Image (spheres, rainbow, N blue to C red):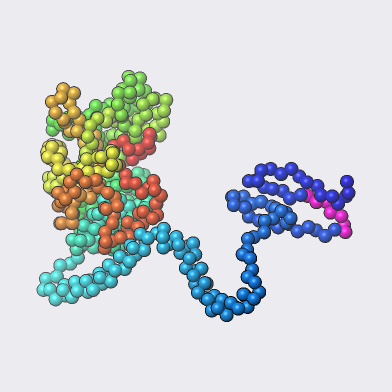
Amino acid sequence: MPACAPEYRLARSNTELIFSPRVKRCAHQQPSFTALRRSFSSTFSLIPEERAVPPEHPAPLPRLIRIITWFPRQCLRPFFALLSFITHPAWKQILVVLPTLWIAALLFIFWKFVQCPIGVLKMIASAISSSPNKQRTVLISGGGSVQALHLARNFHSAGARVIAFEIEGLFALLKYSAAVNKFYTIPKPNPADPLAYARAVKEIVEKESAVFYVPVSSTTPAYYDALAKQHLEVIGCQCFVPCPRDVVALDDPLEMIRICRVAGLPTPQFWVVASEEDVRTWYESGASREGKHFIASAGARGARDRLRFVLPEDRTHFRFPREISAEKPWLIMREPKGEKLMTCTTLKESRAVNNVTCRLDSVRKGLVPQKDDEADAWVQKFIGSFTPTRPMTGHVSFKLVREENSSGNGNKLVVIGARVGVSLPYLCQGPKRCGHAATVGNLLNTVLDTREALFAFWDPLPYCAYYQSRSPEERRPPLPEPCKTPPNVPL
């Protein structure tokens, strides 16, 4: 074999790297040139020049035709350049794939043009009026939830100036709303320093001169808002949340069951566990195979965390990341079988002045507003049996199950959870009196759609931000089921 003969190496499949032949050159030979061509896969192939595929070009026109059409082609060259710029794939994606963004932008610009003269007319009218009303500022928490957006729009429609905030790192939905004047982000509440959250909220109230504070409590426990209440009321800001002791009583499942027993209301089957041995004994009794169960944090300290986990049926799959002790007890509750309901109750001076009830539709995956006199009577009876430390004003949500009696004597409502704050059924309430008057009649037996709740012709950006910045899995509205989470994942 000659000294300058090529030496070939073994090549793998076409989808992997293809090595060019390693050539041993003599001193008199020129180095060979190797061309690179990018493949359609995620890797690159090194292909020798003699095997490279030349690019496809259209056949050139005959020389006579090129001479004759030279002037027309020169005249049409700017037109073709403009046409290639317009038909670029990037423009195609913007014009075809994202039409919602363009429509929302046009609606937003149109509303701004209409809003400016309306605002000028309002300023002139307030200046001419002998007794002008000062615009009040309302602060709303939970700025990443749908119910907070609906609440902000209701207050804005009532003539209030709306300020909102959300925890750092969470989706800031209200930041894109035209109903919100300013938006803030604050650090997540720290159990080691619970007053840090109160100081952050107080700083916003002082800076914006807010006179009302409505905590939604969708991303943080209401306990921290209750701690901030006593600091905000000193500077003249009214808070729609009970005092800390009453919030703990409402968020504690053990206290909830005690109030139900005092009021004569039925309660679900439950077990209190204060150690891992209690959990082991519960599994050995076979109760886990008799239905769907979840474990919730109980007691005064547990109500501050407001955690809930779904329990697996088999004990070998039980991996609990939290402490179970006498200081931190937990409550195991069996979820009754039946129709699931969710309420949003408005309290004023410890009286239930309004209650909206929605049924959970597992087929259509949504909430269905309904007029339920039995649920209204249950809420009135529960609130009447609750003895607060101070008169309560705010919102509270109850999760009920209409369980059928085994004897067939009718149905009974059983409570499986309570939470202080504005819940999803609030979407059924209209803008009258800042959203505290129910208008459920127009929405009866219709599934609450998140798109309908997000979209408003005068406030379209939250709809676009919610559906364009999130993946399809994140766009789905959260179901208000008590056991909606995977095993051992906190709500």
Residue 345 visible in the displayed image: no
Number of disc labels: 0
Prevalent SS, magenta region: loop
Q: Position of residue 401 (x, y in %)?
A: 21, 34
Residue under the point 18% across and 54% down: 430
Task: Specify the farthest residue to the top.
Answer: 285
Q: Is residue 218 above or below residue 294?
A: below
Q: Position of residue 9 (x, y in %)?
A: 76, 45
Q: Is residue 180 magenta?
A: no
Is residue 23 highlighted in magenta? Answer: yes
Look at the image and give the residue range highlighted in magenta: 22-28
Q: Give whichever of 7, 264 is nearer the camera.
A: 7
Q: Is residue 369 above or below residue 116?
A: above
Which quadrant of the rendered structure holds the C terminus? top left
Q: Residue furthest bottom?
A: 71
In-front residue for pair 172/130 = 172
Horizontal side of 309 relative to 32 (left or right) equals left
Q: Residue at x 88, y 49 (%)?
A: 2
Quadrant of the image occupied by residue 249? top left
Instruction: Give the side of residue 35 with respect to residue 174, left or right.
Output: right
Judge whether 234 appears above or below 275 on screen.
below
